[in-house]
Image (cartoon, rainbow, N blue to C red):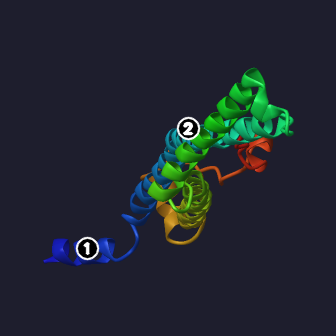
Amino acid sequence: MLAPLVGILVSGCGINTIPTYEEQAKAKWSDVQNQYQRRADLIPNLVETVKGFAQQERAVLEAVTNARARATSIQVNADTITDPEAFKKFQAAQAQLSGALGRLLAVSESYPDLKSNQNFLALQSQLEGTENRIAVARRDYIEAIRLYNTALRTFPGVIWASTLYKSNKPMQEFTVAEDAKRPPQVKF
């Protein structure tokens, strides 16, 4: 009869608090590491995607700009229509401009808002979301560490820490390295 009574008293006195808080803190630290890994995996891929679309659209816009420059650089006067060579150059420059404009129209008809614009907005959103996830994971870890360390130092946890859980030491609070204080650089 005494054994069940002792069991009830021990179960309600916090003997499992220290290991429970320790496991929660470890799980929260894993969440922090997971979010850092997500950032390391996701951001470079998004940046490359944005760069790819921006480069494709830039190539079309540069072709239009160059063709326009060539077309407007040819001097047209009354003599042009009688000079077959000058007329041929004028006609070729105009044809180049028409072709470049046709490609630009095809891109803009397929994508009324150029894809790079949407991709830049998606990248910005992903960057913000990733940094928010990291901040939440850090906050949760800090709270889990606070609970664990408090359980080691307060009654009745201090009794259990000095008897059953001697190897359990306070966990380190999250500190930010100097290089991590700067936001990640995104270059295009």
Residue 51 in view of the camera:
no
Instruction: Compute the Cα span from label 1 to label 2.
Output: 69 Å
Query: Mark 2 is on which residue type?
Result: Gly
Give x and y (percent) for residue 99: 57, 39
Give x and y (percent) for residue 85: 74, 21
In front here: 187 or 117? 117
Image quarter (top left, top right, bottom left or bottom right) of the N terminus: bottom left
Q: Residue at x 86, y 35 (%)?
A: 75
Query: Is 70 positioned to the left or the right of 3 in the image?
Result: right
Give x and y (percent) for residue 183: 74, 50
In front here: 127 or 29? 127
Residue named by callout 1: 6
Q: Residue furthest front?
A: 82
Q: Residue at x 56, y 56 (%)?
A: 114
Q: Nearer the viewer, mark 1 or mark 2?
A: 2
In front here: 144 or 59? 59
- Vertical position of residue 177 compared to residue 96: above or below: below
